[in-house]
Amino acid sequence: VNDFNMFNRIYRVYIQAEAPYRSRRDNMNLFFVKSADNTMVPISSLGTSHFTTGPGTIGRFNMFNSATISGEAAHGYSTGEAMDALEKIVREKLPDNIGVEWSGLSYQERHESGNTGLVLGLALLFVFLFLAAQYESWSVPLAVILSLPIAGVGAYLGIWICGLENNIYFQIGLVMLVGLVAKNAILIVEFAKEEVDKGVDAVHAALTAARLRFRPIVMTSLAFMLGLLPLLFASGPGSAARRDIGTGVFFGMLVAITVGIVFVPFFFVAINKFTNRKRSLKK
């Protein structure tokens, strides 16, 4: 009939006859409705009735009859892969008039999926613009930016070796890894740029910067990686999320300080020579 509020909750009002007056089909004769000439007509005279079976409740979603399906991805598969498999089954096995829609967290995942590249791109753009303002140069920050994909490859290799999933927790770790690896590259590039500004050859400046900054980079990175060990070997409730974050960042940092740090001086020298050659051509 309507709704009413009580104790900060909304309650629905239903009209229902007592059990003795609604237990048999003949009880329909006890209910009347007003006709066009204001006479009372029994409901049973308006049509026929019969007993049948039906569901106790009918679920609806977006105004369509629906059935709720709840599931969980098997070990080694992501929720996105499980959702794709379910949609494939619906397309191949069910009639054309039956479809599938997502709700709750599944809807949010499907709606927001595919934005990882955009988020990482914005993170790289922010780092680039910040360094461009710091160094007052558009070319020098490229030596830092070019070293970041190497750490990303290490992170992906880490979760692949450990059999983990590329989920939202791992992607959060990737964004954090961008800042951590950029910090290490900045230590080398900043010192090398100062030496080049003093008139030192770019190759000599890069090698000197790499030699002087190698120890602090390795020491700070190793200290951070040791702090990630509890995440790598986490157990108990919520351990899957901690392992996904810790594993990606740990292996990304490991590759960054073993492989990526070697490429930073190379990128700096290559970009410096390219910039100088471009300036000489303009002259």
Image (tube, helix red, strand yellow):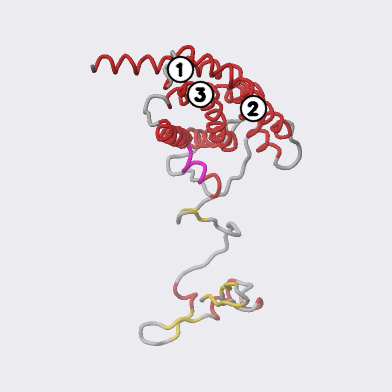
- Which residue occupies the extreme left position in the image? 283
The image position of residue 162, as x and y in percent, is: 67, 24
The relative height of residue 147 versus residue 277 in the rendered view (above or below) is below
Q: Residues within 10 Å of mark 1 (few under 14, many from 20)?
A: many
Q: Residue furthest right?
A: 236
Query: Which residue is at the front of the view, 84 or 209?
Result: 209
Picture quarter containing residue 51?
bottom right
Please name the residue that numbered disc 3 is placed on. 191
Q: What kind of element bears circle 1?
A: helix
Would you say residue 118 is visible in this rendering? Answer: no
Kind of residue indicated by mark 3: Phe
Which residue is disc 2 drawn over? 221
Q: Nearer the viewer, residue 134 or 13?
A: 134
Give the residue drawn at x 47%, y 33%: 120
Name the secondary structure under disc 2.
Answer: helix
What amino acid type should be assigned to the residue bearing mark 1? Phe
